[in-house]
Amino acid sequence: MKFRLAALALLLASAAQAAPQVEQAVDMAVILKPGALPELNVGPETGVPVVEYASVTCPHCGAFDREIWPKLKAAYVDTGKVRYTLREFSRNPLDVAAFTLARCVGGDDVGKTLATIELEFATQDKWAFTQNPLEPLLDSLRPTGLPREKAMACLKDEGLIGKIRGITDRATAEVKIKGTPTFVIDGKSYGGELQMKDFDEILKPLIK
């Protein structure tokens, strides 16, 4: 019995230390080409490119944004080592609506758009999993100052909605995403909610 317990403990320790799994190789030159909307970038152009494909209704994406992203930003983005790009991956019509509203709030101000998406993640439990999500979603965006009339007009903006959907279509074609969040780093895609130790393992060898 002691031998079995020791073997199980060793197996669990090995799993905990396992390297993050690469899903597939991708062409970074293709991935980094800008799309129809302003890229949601944070960090200097000289930083190692890290692209996250996220769904705003995805619980794992929300957990990553709340728990891991602040640490990653402090360690790698704020220090100039990484250029981080968030790409909107819409799994459902509610994602499209939430991302459309975030773009409406931000306009050409990338920082404002990102802050709005972070607000949506922070309030995700109040609107993303309800049967009638529109009103709770609009309520969650009140701190941005987005008037209801403008919000409703944005949700009817077929041009913007088409561009939001286009980000997902492009991601599906280029990265063949299996789930969210998905991260693309150094020509490799990683699926799942990576931890800080995973980012350390991936990024440290790439940083000069």
Image (tube, helix red, strand yellow):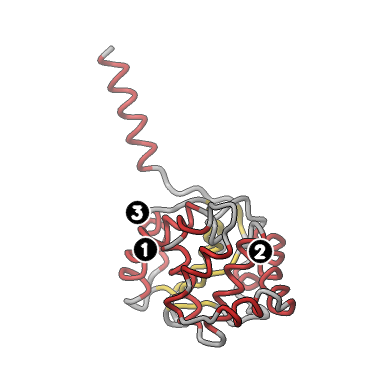
Residue where numbered disc 3 is placed? 197
Report how far apart the C-alphas of labels 1 and 2 lie in the structure: 26 Å
Whichever of labels 1 and 3 marks the residue nearer the N terminus, that label is 3
Q: Amino acid at mark 3?
A: Lys
Q: Quadrant of the C terminus?
A: bottom left
For label 1, the residue is 204
38 versus 192 height, above or below? below
Q: Which residue shows up at 43% across the image and 62% down it?
A: 123
Q: Position of residue 153 (x, y in %)?
A: 66, 80
Q: Amino acid at mark 1?
A: Lys
Quadrant where the image shows the N terminus = top left
- Disc 1 element: helix
Taking depth in this image into account, of 161 and 188 the one nearest to the observer is 161
Point 66% across, 64% down: residue = 171
Q: Whole-percent x and y of residue 109?
A: 51, 86
Mark toward the viewer: 1 or 2: 2
Q: Can you name the residue that lies furthest to the top here?
A: 1
| Left or right for 81, reference 165 | left
Residue 76 locus on image (x, y percent) = 35, 70
Is residue 183 depicted above or below 34 in this figure? above
Q: Are marks 2 and 3 in contact (CB under 8 Å)?
A: no
Residue assigned mark 2: 171
Figure label count? 3
In which quarter of the view is residue 172 placed? bottom right
In this view, 134 is above or below 176: below
SS type, badge 3: helix
